[in-house]
Image (tube, rainbow, N blue to C red):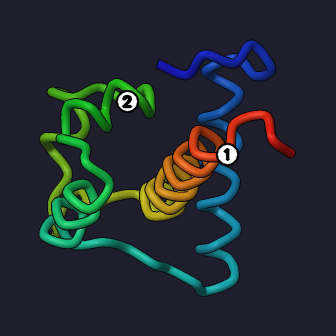
Amino acid sequence: MYKSSLFAKKDIFMVLFYIEMIYIIMGVIITMTKQEFDTALEAVGLSRKDFAELSGVSYLGTVTNWNDEKRPIPVWVNTWLENYAYRKKYEALRNLIGDKI
């Protein structure tokens, strides 16, 4: 679960909603297929259930229902996974160099 107290969970979802709306208004609709979603999850070492827990969405009611037609994977998922990958790299680097900087 998201551990920062900077934003409430509902605030994060509103921000993600507005980002998605901006993408749609600008005509930039970057959606993932279910296969691309599974590949991206595998690349960062997450299962669908892990993703649901970390991002705060329902696993059974949301993630398992995403598909390529009626319920496409939301736009924000792609950027969430990119940021998660960057965070993992940052944490690995920070662990490697420690407090030397």
Q: Residue 57 has which mark?
A: 2
Q: Secondary structure at mark 1?
A: helix
Badge 1 local density, few (<14 within 10 Å), some, or many (20+)? few
Q: Position of residue 52 (x, y in %)?
A: 31, 32
Front position in the image: 46 or 96: 96
Badge 2 local density, few (<14 within 10 Å), some, or many (20+)? some
> Which amino acid type corresponds to the residue marked 1 in the rendered image?
Ile
Horizontal relation, residue 38 to residue 97: left or right? left
Q: Residue at x 22, y 29 (%)?
A: 59
Q: Residue at x 59, y 35 (%)?
A: 13
Q: Position of residue 85 (x, y in %)?
A: 47, 56
Q: Residue 97 has which mark?
A: 1
Horizontal relation, residue 52 to residue 89: left or right? left
The image quadrant that residue 68 belongs to is bottom left
Nearest to the eye among marks 1 and 2: give it: 1
Q: Secondary structure at mark 2?
A: loop
The image quadrant that residue 21 belongs to is bottom right
Q: Is residue 96 above or below residue 23?
A: above
Q: Is residue 31 above or below residue 61?
A: below
Q: Quadrant of the C terminus?
A: top right
> Which amino acid type corresponds to the residue marked 2 in the rendered image?
Val
Q: Residue furthest bottom?
A: 27
Q: Is residue 12 above or below residue 17?
A: above
Front position in the image: 97 or 18: 97
Q: Residue 46 has which mark?
A: none
